[in-house]
Amino acid sequence: MDFDIAIFGAGLGVGLLLTIATWINKWRSAAVSRKELEDLKKHLQTQMNITAKGYEELQQELKRLKQENENLRITVATLSNKPGRIELKTLHLWDKALRMMTTNSPGFAPAWEMAIAEARKEIQETETGVKALVRKVLPILPELSSSNSEER
């Protein structure tokens, strides 16, 4: 067996060629993978930025809505405590109770109508005439006259 340098050189050359070809192929594959990884990182960064902006906007909207809710709660509390609101609520309550009594109690309606007429007459007398003058001059007198009328 003779050692032929030409065969050895050809085998070595083919081996080196295959190694270089494989190395170039791996290098291209790695470059493609790196480029794809960079693209994926950019896409992920973009998605994260969009999500962060959306989350930040939602947080600001939530903060604004909480503030608006608090302002409305304060406004409702203020409006419900305005002078006359309690009296209006009481008036509505009495109105509902009177309507229920009028429909449920047969003898209540005529007595109620008579009481309304008497109260209306008394208010008209208080608003005009001598009682109005006396009430303006001596404000405590109508209280005494109403307590006297209750004693009768």
Image (spheres, grey):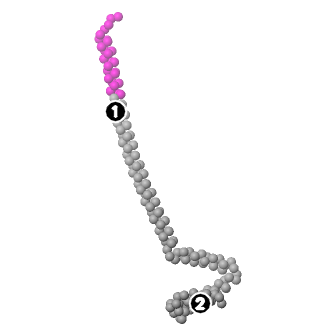
Q: Residue furthest top?
A: 1
Query: Looking at the image, which residue is at 43% across and 58% down?
Result: 63
Q: Is residue 117 visible?
A: no
The image shows residue 132, relative to residue 87, as above or below, that is below
Residue hosting label 1? 31
The image shows residue 133, relative to residue 58, as above or below, that is below
Q: Is residue 16 magenta?
A: yes
Q: Residue 29 at x, y = what percent?
A: 36, 31
From the image, which quarter does the C terminus lie in? bottom right
Residue 45 quadrant = top left
The image shows residue 68, relative to residue 27, as above or below, that is below
Check disc 1 and report its element: helix, strand or loop.
helix
Residue hosting label 2? 145
The residue stretch that appears in magenta: 1-26
Q: Earlier in the sequence, mark 2 or mark 1?
A: 1
- Magenta stretch, overall SS: helix
Query: Looking at the image, which residue is at 34% across and 25% down?
Result: 23
> Local crowd at mark 2 within 10 Å, few (<14), some, or many (≥20)?
few
Q: Residue 8 at x, y = what percent?
A: 32, 12
